[in-house]
Amino acid sequence: MTAPAAGTAEARGWARPVSGAVRPVVTGLGIVAPSGIGVEEYWASTLRGQLRIAPISRFDSSRYDARLAGEVGGFEPEAHVDKRYLVQTDRWTWFGMAASRLALADAAYDPSAHEPYATAVVFGSGSGGNDFGQRELERLWTRGRTAVSVYQSIAWFYAATTGQTSIRHGLKGPSGVVVSDGAGGLDSLAQARRVIRRGTSTVLAGGAESGLTPYALTCHLSSGRVSTATAPADGYKPFDVRANGYLPGEGGATLIVEDPAAAAARGAPRLYGEIAGYAATQDALGHGRTASDGRWLAVAMRRALADADVEPDEVDVVFADGAGSSDLDTQEAAAIRAVFGARPVPVTAPQGLVGRLCAAGSALSVATALLSIRDSVLPAVGNLDTPDPAHGLNLVREVRPGPVRTVLVNARGYGGFNSSLVVRALGPA
């Protein structure tokens, strides 16, 4: 085999293509979460195991069965979003635009310094603009159609964050939105990989959500899987013997995904890791009905590992979907055991600290996995008191030292979506 030419991405250990396929690298992270705004604030809170679930403050939830959620505190939209966009957009889009701004700064990537078609946007979305939509519908029924904002037609739409982000930064590469509930964050990264392999050098990917309004909470409750606990510590508890459902959360996570050669050419200041493998399956049996076991999640996991050219014993930790319902956690545990056999691979689910953020949650999981690789540390399962022994998993109870070089991230969405993604450290071990 001929050695790579000096100065190329491969020579610098930034890429390890398999069968000629480009493995995109992540060069920037932007996070807006109940645990903090910005990478370091979020990461420090996560490692401290700070529970950010609290009583809903954005509206009176006393008439609802669920009254707890993971809200983003201290978020001043004017500090992150240009004023002209605030009137046109919903809170979820503010989160997405803020996370994107932070990610671009983290990557030292200025879109205006590049040809407009060189940069694209692909976000995942699970519910769209709930806050804006509810407000305008209330105006419609109480004050009439002339009271409804002209921006109602676009602010609620699933693609609003993608569109407004592309407009704000002048991005004209092939863009889109992926709607697959909780799996959307992983699926957006997979689409980013496809876009890069087709010739676009940079993609902003991830997800944002803000489903904390009366209507959105009603939609959550219709699933029958929302915890009705009244104390935060009794709520969302992935893999715990007291698992009793999830609690919703809000926020956004954007990842700057680049072709490795393009990242090397511009001298990207940091490289969090590479998107090494991905796969997805569907196990819906009908409306609201899915398979009663985790076999199709196991298939997605195996295919993602194969796509990454990674053996199960190379995986240092699994970032689980951690649905927080006993039956769904049982399914995922069975899938993990099926893939890893007798090997007690560490399993974590930090999202127990902040709630389930739908598409933003799986994007946040990937960002967290990359921070785990960066600092060679395993964060603990969020809000876990007593692991359910029936799951047979090696759950991370306290922060553990690494090494962490290969991570498998799982995500599942309502309606039968199963996605798995592998991220890996760059360069020699």
Image: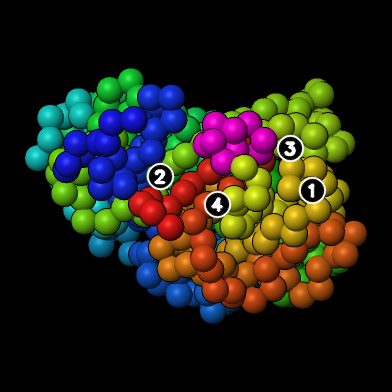
Q: Which residue is rendered at x = 40% and y = 26% of the image?
A: 21
Residue reaching furthest to the left = 113
Q: Which residue is rendered at x = 20% and y = 25% of the image?
A: 117
Q: Height in image: 423 above or below 42?
A: above
Write down the residue under mark 4. 407
Q: Quadrant of residue 242?
A: bottom right
In magenta, the rendered stretch is: 301-310
Spatial separation of the CA atoms under disc 1 and disc 3: 12 Å
Q: Which residue is rendered at x = 88% and y = 64% of the image?
A: 389
Write down the residue under mark 3. 298
Closer to the camera, 351 or 194? 194
In the rendered structure, the answer to whether residue 27 lies left or right of residue 268 reads right
Label 1: how many Cα within 10 Å (few below 14, some 14–19, many 20+)? few
In the rendered structure, the answer to whether residue 244 lies left or right of residue 259 reads right
Spatial separation of the CA atoms under disc 2 and disc 3: 22 Å
- Check disc 3 and give the amino acid type: Ala
Q: Quadrant of residue 74?
A: bottom left
Q: Quadrant of residue 241?
A: bottom right
Write down the residue under mark 1. 341
- Check disc 2 and give the amino acid type: Glu
Spatial separation of the CA atoms under disc 4 and disc 2: 11 Å
N-term mark: 1 or 2: 2
- In the rendered image, residue 307 lying in the magenta stretch gets the answer yes
- Location of the N terminus by quadrant is top left
Write down the residue under mark 2. 274
